[in-house]
């Protein structure tokens, strides 16, 4: 009986992890987390250029809808409808939703944007591209106004000197990725790679 009490009790149950196993597991977790963060940032850059192009296309559609709905600007329906103005000499990270108040079919100087036609208190606005993206070029040069003339709306694409049947607007991010927005004279607006 004494031998029962005197017998050293040993527990050979070796459950748990060794220090080496814990260090290896933490190293693998850190490596996987690093890869996920790197891919997340790459995806975020791709998403910002995608969303900037979608925002521009949406603003163009808003101008089209404003023209169709005869939305008023400063108490009057714009004769030249609503449009979007891009001027790369002034700003590459913004564009304007404007009401073409002074449009006259006989006077080409009235086809585009003029100061005071995009005031927020009357329904106009200046839109900014997403952080890290900018408007790189347009197929018509550094300036273009795209107007949707009521009641059809007929699409008027004007580069400051002449009209065109289509325009391609290229957006770019800091990594050099691009997206384009295309508008044609029938009012079709496309956004894509």
Image (cartoon, grey):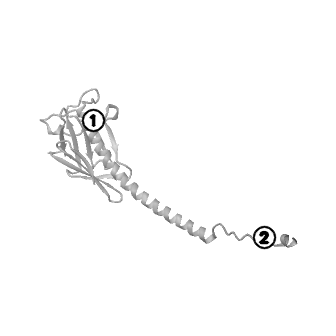
**In front here: 127 or 56?**
56
Q: Estimate the x, y position of residue 147 in percent, counting from the top left.
A: 21, 39
Question: Quick one: SS at disc 1?
Answer: loop
Q: Residue at x 85, y 73 (%)?
A: 3
Among all residues in the image, which is located at the extreme left? 106
Q: Residues within 10 Å of mark 2 (few under 14, many from 20)?
A: few
Residue 121 in which image quadrant: top left
Q: Position of residue 23 (x, y in %)?
A: 59, 69
Mark drawn on residue 9:
2
Between 152 and 30, which is closer to the camera in this rendering? 30
Q: Which residue is mark 1?
A: 117
The residue most toward the top is 75
**Residues at marks 1 and 2 touching, judged by CB atoms closer than 8 Å:** no
Q: Position of residue 98 (x, y in %)?
A: 27, 37
Along the polypeptide, which appears first: circle 1 or circle 2? Answer: 2
Quadrant where the N terminus sits is bottom right
* Residue at the front extreme of this rendering: 1
Residue drawn at (60%, 67%) of the image? 22
């Amino acid at each position: 009986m004494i031998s029962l009490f005197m017998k050293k009790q040993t527990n050979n149950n070796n459950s748990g992890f060794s220090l080496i196993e814990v260090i290896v597991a933490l190293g693998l977790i850190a490596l996987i987390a690093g890869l996920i963060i790197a891919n997340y940032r790459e995806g975020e850059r791709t998403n910002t250029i995608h969303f900037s192009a979608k925002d521009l296309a949406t603003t163009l559609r808003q101008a089209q809808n404003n023209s169709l709905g005869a939305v008023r600007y400063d108490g009057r329906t714009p004769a030249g409808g609503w449009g979007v103005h891009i001027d790369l000499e002034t700003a590459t990270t913004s564009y304007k939703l404007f009401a073409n108040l002074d449009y006259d079919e006989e006077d080409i100087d009235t086809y585009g944007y003029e100061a005071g036609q995009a005031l927020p208190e009357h329904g106009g606005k200046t839109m900014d591209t997403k952080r890290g993206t900018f408007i790189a070029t347009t197929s018509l040069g550094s300036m273009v106004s795209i107007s949707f003339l009521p009641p059809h709306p007929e699409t008027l694409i004007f580069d400051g000197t002449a009209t065109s049947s289509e325009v391609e607007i290229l957006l770019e991010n800091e990594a050099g990725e691009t997206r384009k927005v295309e508008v044609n004279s029938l009012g079709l607006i496309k956004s894509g790679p």
